Every structure is written in structure tokens, then in C-alpha cells.
Amino acid sequence: MTSNEGGMDLSRLLTGFDAAEKAKAQHRQLEQLLVELLGIADALHELERHLADLERKGVQDVPRRSIEIVLRKLLTVLKSHQVERMDCKGQPFDLERHEVLEVKPVRGMSDDIVLEECVHGYMWHPRVLRHAKVIISRAEAVPEPVGKRAKRRKRKQKPQQ
């Protein structure tokens, strides 16, 4: 191999390295943009909830339709960049995807099932862009019927007498 061939290989290697660094920088910029868009989506969801409260209180002429249109367009833009909203309700708790805000005791349900999604989580490709903030279940024992408890107490009391 001549020194000229080695120089060309080094040049190609540096060019490839520069292209990879440029792609990483673009990837970081896109990720930051998506996070900012999620913040806007959250603000629109909050505004939508506030407008619904105003409607329940009897306030007329609430511009709810405009907010819904903007929110729908924003979610379409996010989807075009492969950002998907997580569907967490009823799913088992996953430490990689969820952040627990509260644990509620629930009868007849197993532990660690998502009861409510307080803040939506989003995935970007296979990565979590933002964790969902959730309320999960804690299994609560079903109390025995009173008749069975009373019979058991009587059985326990007989040997003592």
C-alpha cells in the first residue's frame, strides 16, 4: 500500500466520522423539538380541561373546537415523526415506561396495574421520549363474610374454656 492509498482511506474515514457526528447532532435536535412539541400538547390538553370546566359552570361561547383542531394537528405532526402516545390504562406497571404518582388499594385486582394515566407518556421508535405518570393498584384482600369469621372465633374459643 502506498502512502497515497493510506491518505485516501484516512480521508474517507474522517468524512464518515463527520457524517456520523452530523447525524447525531440532527437526531438530538429532532429529539429536543419533539420534547417541546409534547410540552405544547400538554398545554393544549390542560386548556381543553379548563374549557370543559368552564362549560360545566355554564360559561357560553367557549372556543373548544379551535383547541381540539390545533391539538389534533399537533398529534398528527408527532405521529409523522413516529412519536406514539402510550396506552397505559389497564396495563401492568413497567418501570422503563411509567413513573408512579400514587398507589391505590383496590379489591379484586392484582398489584401494579395502571389505574389512571395522569400525564401521557410517549414513545419515539423503541425509546421512551417521556415517561407516563400513573396511578397503580395495590391488591386489597377481600374480607371474609361475617358468618365465617364468627365460626372461626367460636372454634378458637372452645379449647380455652
Image (cartoon, grey):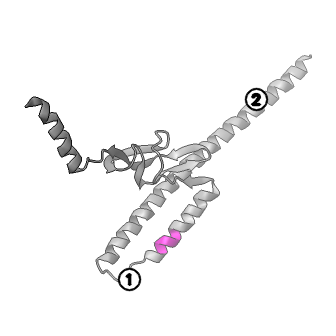
The disc, 2 or 1, on the residue closer to the chain's N-terminal end is 2
Callout 2–callout 1 Cβ contact below 8 Å: no
**Residue 77 part of the magenta-drawn span:** no
Where residue 22 sits, quadrant-wise, is: top right
Q: Is residue 25 above or below residue 159?
A: below
Q: Residue furthest bottom?
A: 60
Residue 140 position, x and y percent, is 31, 45
Q: Is residue 95 above or below residue 73?
A: above
Magenta: main secondary structure equals helix
Q: Residue furthest left?
A: 161
Q: Quadrant of the C terminus?
A: top left
Which residue is denoted by mark 2 in the rendering?
14
Which residue is denoted by mark 1 in the rendering?
61
Write down the region rendered in magenta: 66-70
Q: Kindly identify the residue that appears in the image at 73 percent across and 37 percent down.
A: 19
Q: Kindly identify the residue that appears in the image at 20 percent across and 40 percent down.
A: 152
Residue 150 position, x and y percent, is 17, 45
Secondary element at tag 1: loop
> Closer to the camera, 153 or 7?
153
Q: Is residue 88 left or right of residue 28?
A: left
Spatial separation of the CA atoms under disc 2 and disc 1: 61 Å
Q: Quadrant of the N terminus?
A: top right
Q: For the residues carrying marks 2 and 1, which lies nearer the camera in this image? A: 1
> Closer to the camera, 107 or 120?
107
Q: Kindly identify the residue that appears in the image at 30 percent across and 81 percent down.
A: 58
Q: Kindly identify the residue that appears in the image at 46 percent across and 55 percent down.
A: 39
Local crowd at mark 2 within 10 Å, few (<14), some, or many (≥20)?
A: few
Where residue 14 sits, quadrant-wise, is: top right
Residue 66 position, x and y percent, is 48, 75
Q: Amino acid at mark 2?
A: Leu
Local crowd at mark 1 within 10 Å, few (<14), some, or many (≥20)?
A: few
